[in-house]
Amino acid sequence: MSPRKQQLLSLHRRHKRLVLLCGALFLVATAVFVAWWLALLLLLCGWVAHEAWFADHLFYSPRTDYQYRFPDGTAQQTVSLDEGRVKLTAPLANGDTLFLELRLISSWLGRWVDPHVLIGGDRQDFERGVRGRRFLNLSGQEAALAAGQLRIRGCHCRLSANATLYVLRNPDYAEKRMMIVAPHADDAELAAFGLYRRAAGVSIVTLTQGETEAGSYRRLGLDAAAAARLKGRLRTWDSLAVPLWGGVPQSRCVQLGYHCMQLSAMLADPGSPFPSRESGDADVREARRHNPLSLPADVDGLPCGGNLVADLAALLDHFRPQVVVTPHPQLDPHVDHVAATRALELAMQQSAWQPEVALLYANHLHDNDRWPMGPAGNGTALPPALTALPVDGLWSPLLSSTAQLDKAMALAMHHDLQGGLRCKLRLRRQIQRALAARRWPATGDNEFFRKSVRRHEIFWVRRLHG
């Protein structure tokens, strides 16, 4: 977790403790001066209300405007939202990725039920109580939009009468040689399964074994270190085997075997080894047994930053990708994700081969743990950006219903996304289903089955040269 994310979570918990303290004092006063049974009833009602409406990790006001800037030369025009349709004021520019900037204003009911916008056959959800600038994803709706037939309607929210349409044009990056950098097993599938299942020349490089937070494996009679080793072995296998479901052979999948939550420390002190925090293992070679090629760290097996960067440089020279797919260092706060992209940048300084484009993805956010919001299978609006980001292009390829199902099944194969919910979370979902009209997919209980299986994948396009 990044320092900013830790700060936001700490502030959230501090506010929550203050509210709980005030609530406890109120309940004590009610029990003493009114009736004990009323205090118990109020306690139950307060808990249900918390689970239904206040359990989200939303670390900003829903009245905050999103801050996005588009590259110079991006085609744009003012459009009107009239009679339930998007009406253009000029011919639609050629492009594959379209975003509509508008203001959303939540209705009273939209403070309790997730407000959303229906666009053609799509639905995109936003924060309860939203009142600010947001960006709808219209990619895939070009034909209806150009014909003036794209229907749009707010549910539990009002839409501004005027909006700005942005149209971005990209090549199909699936037709280029591509290398996906995944800090952990499952990151490649979460961010880019729909993309890589179409790509002919893709390679997938997973940086870590994924051995941390292995407490559930101790039920097998293992101590903490043995449980971490087992989880690391399983997720190492996942990183090599699951991509075959998307058509990527094992000969183009590489597991580097470094340790979770250690990548940033490795880069800060590149000459020192950083063993696993949970298993204690300090040799990465066991996790590399099935790799299709030899790499610099195979010599000594040390989990150090110098070896990580040298491995990535060697892989760039071997696979010669035109496009690298890697976490967005400003949007995705996970420390391993930030370090993964930093390690790739350092590797490009060492390698003879230089990619042309980076496609950046965000599997986590600083400010909103529910993005993309709303049910699975729908579109993906732009995520919260509360401070100005680098001015990158955007590319949002579509996933067919078949691709979405295949993506869900790929996620289901990952050991870290398997298993049922804890009793508290299962009860919370039942309360939210009944009181907040939320829905979860049948494909899996993990929240990523809802967040990641969508009709759009989104990548920020960053030119690396020229």
Image (cartoon, grey):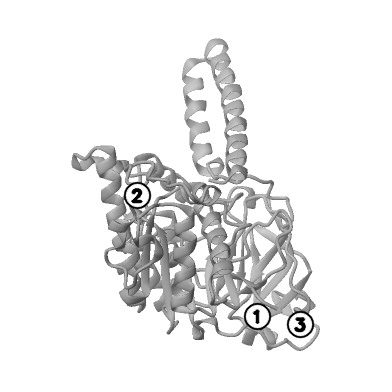
Nearer to me, 434 or 401: 401
Q: Left or right: 176 with respect to 414?
A: right
Residue that extends furthest to the top in the rendered view of this protein: 32
Identify the mark at residue 88; answer none if there is no mark: 3
Element at badge 2?
loop
Q: CA distance from mark 2 to mark 3?
A: 52 Å
Q: Which residue is mark 1?
A: 150
Residue at (49% x, 61% y) in the render: 309
Chain-order first, disc 1 or disc 3: 3
Element at badge 3?
loop
Q: Left or right: 7 with respect to 400?
A: right
Q: Give the amino acid at mark 3.
A: Leu
Q: Is residue 12 above or below residue 301?
A: above
Identify the mark at residue 211; answer none if there is no mark: 2
Element at badge 1?
loop
Chain-order first, disc 2 or disc 3: 3
Chain-order first, disc 1 or disc 2: 1
Q: Give the amino acid at mark 2.
A: Glu
Q: Could you say which quadrant of the image residue 133 lies in?
A: bottom right
Identify the mark at residue 52; answer none if there is no mark: none
Q: Is residue 242 above or below residue 248?
A: above
